[in-house]
Image (cartoon, rainbow, N blue to C red):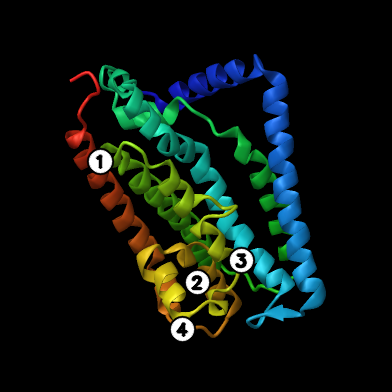
Amino acid sequence: MDYFRMYRRFVIIYIKGKLAYHFSLLFELIANTILIGVYFVGFNVIFHNFNSVAGWNKYEVLFMFTTSWLSYSFSCFFFWSPMRDIGERIRSGRFDLYLTRPISPFVYLVLQQFQYTFLPRLFFSIFFWIYSLQNLQIEWTVITVFQYCASLLAAFAIFSAITVITGTISFWTVKSEEIVSLLTDNNYGLKNFCDYPIQIYSKEIQFLLTFIVPYALTGYYPVSNLLGKDCPNLWIAYISPVIAFVMAIIAYIFWHIGLKHYGSTGA
């Protein structure tokens, strides 16, 4: 089955539906652009008053969290909205419709939506990622390019796995929107903690972001390795693809366990 063609058609249909209320779509994009813009204003205020944070200068921190944001934005295009909204579909009984389609309910759930509100975040990420690179002296080799690209793919898998796991909880709780937002929202959720070097947090928070909800693997550890930073547990940067693969498997298994547990509203 050609999932790419199917996804393209779903996106076209989804965008056409949104364009029926074009002012709403425009205001959503403007609001998200302003929100991200305010974030970067705050970032510049911090580094206007401090030369560094935990030994990281402005461009190093900027490169670190835009690296994380790139993977996060692409992950959210596919998984954030479906996993945030799955609880509502279960409560209303509309999830039954996904079980009657000739494709996997998970695939259909993901393909039929396109979270366009993350476009401003992606554009800002690309712009400031390039800007930070221009102000850093990184010696790129075949090995470092490969490691960096692998870390981006691993970060995408980690973000996606965490989002799917938190959304799947709805099969038991029937409502997990708050859990999804708490763990994955970059504006006020736990994800926001990995935008700065984790040394600024307590040992407990560092352990949480490294071994429990491994957001530190999406930016901090790979970039620390690339920049030659001296930080504890740096070895974990080398196995982040393995951890990402394991998390993807866990998310896959957890989803299917939840699907089996699902009890239709009309049942």
* In this view, the mark in front (4 or 1): 1
Query: In terms of sequence position, does the residue under pointer 2 or pointer 1 come before the other?
Result: 1
* Secondary structure under the numbered disc 2 in the rendered image: helix
The residue carrying mark 3 is 64
Tell me the CA gap for discs 4 and 2. 9 Å
The reply to whether discs 2 and 3 touch (Cβ–Cβ < 8 Å) is no
Tell me what residue is drawn at x 31 percent, y 18 percent: 97
Tell me the CA gap for discs 1 and 3. 36 Å
The residue carrying mark 2 is 221
The image shows residue 136 at horizontal and vertical percentages of: 72, 71
The residue carrying mark 4 is 232
* Secondary structure under the numbered disc 1 in the rendered image: helix
> For this rendering, which residue is in front, 120 or 173?
173
Residue closest to the far right: 48
Query: In terms of sequence position, does the residue under pointer 2 or pointer 3 come before the other?
Result: 3
Tell me what residue is drawn at x 45 percent, y 73 percent: 205
The image shows residue 86 at horizontal and vertical percentages of: 38, 33
Res. 82 in view = yes
Query: In terms of sequence position, does the residue under pointer 1 or pointer 3 come before the other?
Result: 3
What amino acid is labelled 2 in the image? Tyr
What amino acid is labelled 4 in the image? Pro
Residue 172: mark? 1
Tell me what residue is drawn at x 54 percent, y 85 percent: 230
Relative to 165, is 141 on the left or the right? right
What amino acid is labelled 1 in the image? Trp
What amino acid is labelled 3 in the image? Met
Query: In terms of sequence position, does the residue under pointer 4 or pointer 1 come before the other?
Result: 1
The reply to whether discs 4 and 1 touch (Cβ–Cβ < 8 Å) is no
